[in-house]
Image (cartoon, rainbow, N blue to C red):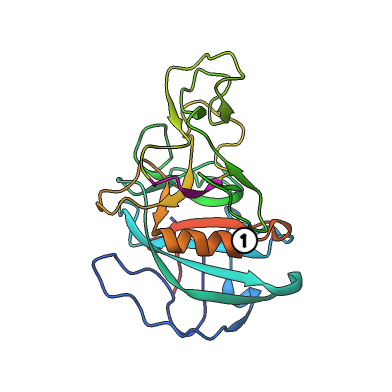
Amino acid sequence: MKRLLLLTLGLTLFCACQNEKMPKVTTNRIDIPQKQLLQIHNKNITLPKDSSQLLFVTTPDWNSREGTLQRYERIDKSEAWKKVGEPIRIILGRNGLAWGLGLHTIPKNTKYIKKEGDGRSPAGLFYLGNGFGYKNFKIDFPYHIYKRTDHCVDDSNSQWYNKIIDSTKIAKDYKSFEHMKLKNNLYKYGITVNHNPKQIKNAGSCIFMHIRSGNGKGTAGCTAMSEDKIKEILKWLKEEKKPLLLQLPKGEVGN
């Protein structure tokens, strides 16, 4: 498969496995022309020109559940991007990554395509939806406080599939769902990912970024990190900058 992405920074900024040492990264911001930061080698992935914040997740391979998230920002919608902060250790689906449904096209004859219940996080490019949590959190990005009765529906036969709904206000036609306020703190702070917005059956649902459990076993398909890091990202996100999530295994990234 052709490689999709090239970062020509003179050094590799990408992922380190959770069990390996994190790469040393300077805290100084580096101005990088867009053509040098992100070069798309085929038509599968194109960054929207009106987006200027990017969360870029890379993993060692398609089957790895560990990876690194790096933030990038484009100032004043120019071609100059800036790397923001240091790499963040994340954990993905317990079975790794598979191409999801978002702003990209899925390569032909690919082995990995996201399916409901496959334990894989979606690879590709996606808009972020809104922040969420159990209590108020003042940020410059849409934010919802969810209750125990708010459900994310993962039943493909429901009209509410891949939607978060108030279960007290609709006619329940689903057999499977997630509580958006859990009995633990994993969803204390989180971000929705606009994966499968057209509600394609069995293509995967309820994809979030949220707090990691710490057991190292991987998620059901989300991207998880420490509480302080998810809060840091939420504070950084700006609605008008139309932030994106890009997730790829390292094998799809050039050198």
Range of the magenta residues? Answer: 185-192
Foreground residue among 174 and 168: 168
Residue 222 lies, in percent from the top left, at 42, 46
Residue 18 is drawn in which quadrant?
bottom left
The residue at the point 58 percent across, 26 percent down is 166
Q: Secondary structure at mark 1?
A: loop
Drawn side of residue 144 relative to residue 211, left or right: right
The residue at the point 50 percent across, 47 percent down is 107
Drawn side of residue 150 relative to residue 33, left or right: left
The residue at the point 33 percent across, 62 percent down is 60
Residue 184 is drawn in which quadrant?
top left
Foreground residue among 38 and 168: 168
Magenta segment: does it hold 52?
no
Foreground residue among 171 and 105: 171
Depicted 199 relative to depicted 122: above or below? above
The residue at the point 33 percent across, 75 percent down is 22
Residue 95 lies, in percent from the top left, at 30, 45
The C terminus lies in quadrant: bottom left
Depicted 82 relative to depicted 110: above or below? below
User: From this viewpoint, is residue 78 visible?
Assistant: no
Depicted 243 relative to depicted 121: above or below? below
User: From this viewpoint, is residue 218 visible?
Assistant: yes
- Give the labeled residue for mark 1: 237
Drawn side of residue 63 relative to residue 37, left or right: left
Residue 245 lies, in percent from the top left, at 55, 56
Assess disc 1: are there few (<14), some (14-19) or many (≥20) residues with their C-alpha within 10 Å of its C-alpha: many
Magenta segment: does it hold 191?
yes
The N terminus lies in quadrant: bottom left
Q: Residue type at mark 1?
A: Leu
Q: For the image shown, how many numbered marks are present on the structure?
A: 1
Residue 40 lies, in percent from the top left, at 58, 64
